Amino acid sequence: MKRKIKKKIKISRFEKLLYTVAIVLLLASPISIVFSKATLSKINFEVEKKKDAIAVQEKTNESISMAINELASLTKIQQVAEEQGLSYNNDNIKRVTEDN
């Protein structure tokens, strides 16, 4: 009867290091992918919150601008002047022009 002779293959330190690094990379890559996707999702959520805040601020700015235009209109100025006892006299208005 023949015995099978088993040969032991010696693995060098470099090969052990190489295998260890490969296994660590294989285990770390799914973890890093999940972590990066979670971070990206969080950042996207914050961006959407900022966009909503910007939209609200733009509406507020628009309404304030409309209020400024209403208060600066000639009819409003005349109304306030009359309430203060002043009168509108077009002859007293002087125009400033730029001469080139």
Image: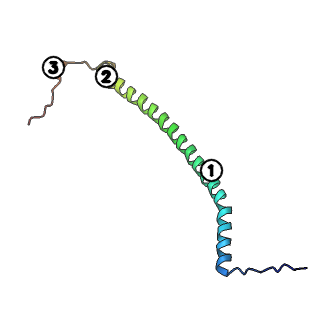
Q: Quadrant of residue 89?
A: top left
Residue at 67% from the left image edge and 81% from the top image edge: 13
Q: Nearer the viewer, mark 1 or mark 2?
A: 1
| SS type, badge 3 | helix
Q: Nearer the viewer, residue 79 or 66?
A: 66
Q: Residues within 10 Å of mark 1 (few under 14, many from 20)?
A: few
Could you tell whether 10 is left or right of 100 in the image? Answer: right
Distance of label 3 from label 1 (alpha carbons)? 71 Å
Above or below, 24 relative to 71: below
Residue receiving disc 1 = 38
| SS type, badge 2 | loop
Above or below, 13 relative to 81: below
Residue receiving disc 2 = 73
Residue receiving disc 3 = 91
Distance of label 1 from label 2 (alpha carbons)? 53 Å
Lower position in the chain sequence, tag 3 or tag 1: 1
Q: Nearer the viewer, mark 3 or mark 1?
A: 1
Q: Nearer the viewer, residue 11 or 57?
A: 11
Quick one: quadrant of the C terminus? top left
Distance of label 3 from label 2 (alpha carbons)? 19 Å
Q: Residues within 10 Å of mark 2 (few under 14, many from 20)?
A: few
Q: Residues within 10 Å of mark 3 (few under 14, many from 20)?
A: few
Lower position in the chain sequence, tag 3 or tag 2: 2
